[in-house]
Amino acid sequence: MTGRIHHRPMTPGDGFFDEIVGGADPAQVREAGDLAATILVRGARDSDDPELAERIVHLAESEGLETLAEVWSGAPSDTLAGSLWRLFLLRSWVYADPERVAGEYDAGHRRVDVARVVAGVADPPGPDELRSMVDDVLRGIARGDFAVTLFRAAAFARIVAAGRASLGEATHEEITRMLVLSEQLEASGQLEIAHTLG
């Protein structure tokens, strides 16, 4: 036995945690992200502002993709915030490497006929056509049915995944990531239909 005297641990006062400098409370960030997503999706349809759709398309550029990532990237895929994050990420990816995406889309669009029709990309699918399509998909947030927007994005991702597989240049992980994105967007579209009908 040691001669050490044991004391009850000290409990810090209220001011202790106030003095710790740190980032934003994750719960508050998620709540703010969910609210912003709801306003963006549900409120956009009720707006009479003709410029709103264009502002939505360019949201990642005006606010920064990093800002959107901060509030939406951790959201589950079956939430509005998670769905929006995936849509903006898809657009950013298309704009970052349109030639590669066009090649993958071209390789996949003959293999996934139904998805090609839903995605709505011009034939032949060049870089300009893909940028135009992804912008048009995002305009659907304000101008159309959000479920259709999600289904179009899902179809596009499925075609790209098929193209990646057929070209044999992408890793298994890259192909799987695109398939998972497609499945997540499609599932979100189904949930959006259930929300609209409910």
Image (cartoon, rainbow, N blue to C red):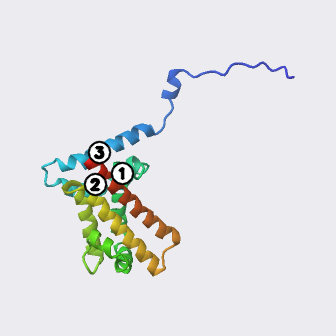
Say what amino acid the circle numbered 3 marks: Thr
Earlier along the polypeptide chain: callout 1 or callout 3?
3
Mark 3 secondary-structure assignment:
helix
Mark 1 secondary-structure assignment:
helix
Say what amino acid the circle numbered 2 marks: Leu
For the residues bearing labels 1 and 2, Cβ distance under 8 angstroms? yes
From the top left corner, tell me how far across and down residue 78 is, in percent: 39, 51
Disc 2 residue crowd, few under 14, some 14–19, many 20+, Cα 10 Å: some
Q: Which residue is mark 2?
A: 59
Say what amino acid the circle numbered 1 marks: Leu
Query: Looking at this view, is 59 or 158 the one in front?
Result: 158
From the top left corner, tell me how far across and down residue 127 is, in percent: 30, 75
From the top left corner, tell me how far across and down residue 6 is, in percent: 75, 20
Rounded to the nearest angstrom, the CA distance separating label 1 from label 2 is 9 Å
Instruction: Please state if 118 lies on the left or on the right of 46 as rendered.
Output: right
Dividing the picture into quarters, in which one does residue 104 lie? bottom left
Disc 3 residue crowd, few under 14, some 14–19, many 20+, Cα 10 Å: some
From the top left corner, tell me how far across and down residue 153 is, in percent: 32, 64
Mark 2 secondary-structure assignment:
helix
In the depicted structure, whether residue 126 falls above or below residue 30: below
